[in-house]
Image (cartoon, rainbow, N blue to C red):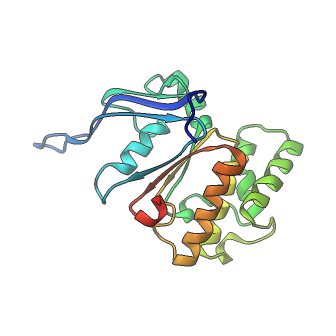
Amino acid sequence: MKTTEMAEIIKTEDLRYAYPAEEGQEPVQVLKGVDLSIQRGEFVAVLGHNGSGKSTLAGCFNAIRLPTGGVCYVDMMDTRDENNTYEVRKTVSMVFQNPDNQIVATVVEEDVAFALENMGIPPAEIRKRVDDALKAVGMYRAQAPHRLSGGQKQRVAIAGVIAMMPRCVVLDEPTAMLDPQGRREVMSVVRELNRKYGITVILITHHMDEAV
């Protein structure tokens, strides 16, 4: 999908990140001079074994983690500038490994609407976005999240992200806790995000078959 017309949505230059040192220890260098460029509308897989820094890198894209060296730009915004944090997080949304950590309501539609309400979106717009997002992931409004399978819960978490209408979604090993059927469900939705809606997708994974 890469074309010369595409604009960069994420760019890093000599990006470094070190976790703070414990007493008497050296800081733990995890990212050591990462240079990358991700174009708007691309689907990019980031592969690596456990402990290789994939989740740390993902956190930098969303300003959850700020570089200890170098720079990370999101849609030309420097993530180190606190004035950019809100817009950075509107631009790049995260989906994590465990969907239970992202589900906050007892009814699916309320969960998908939660972030929109906090953003002050008008009720009529919230309803439309919730309907569209749930349709995109094949889920229903009145379902109770605690009764859903792992794959269905992850689809609800993704619906919450879709409703926010970000330009980029970072999925940090979203199928790590799912069975094969759940993995297929989630990957189908993720591909649709990119193909149908043109959302930039960054998939953090250690499953080679998902990357393929």
Image location of residue 196, percent across then percent down: 72, 50
Q: How many marks?
A: 0
Q: Is residue 146 above or below residue 69?
A: below
Quadrant of the rendering where the N terminus is positioned? top right
Say which quarter of the image contains residue 41: top right
Q: Residue furthest right?
A: 124
Q: Is residue 211 above or below residue 38?
A: below
- Taking the image as shown, residue 25 lies to the left or right of residue 173, namely left
Q: Nearer the viewer, residue 10 or 209?
A: 209
- Taking the image as shown, residue 35 lies to the left or right of residue 58, namely left
Q: Residue at x 47, y 60 (%)?
A: 212
Q: Nearer the viewer, residue 63 or 169?
A: 169
- Taking the image as shown, residue 196 lies to the left or right of residue 149, namely right
Image location of residue 56, percent across then percent down: 37, 45
Q: Nearer the viewer, residue 194 or 167?
A: 194
Q: Residue at x 73, y 72 (%)?
A: 144
Q: Residue at x 51, y 61 (%)?
A: 174
Q: Nearer the viewer, residue 52 or 1?
A: 1
Say which quarter of the image contains residue 106: bottom right
Say which quarter of the image contains residue 187: bottom right
Image location of residue 50, percent across then percent down: 31, 60
Image location of residue 51, percent across then percent down: 28, 55
Q: Residue furthest left?
A: 24
- Taking the image as shown, residue 210 lies to the left or right of residue 29, namely right
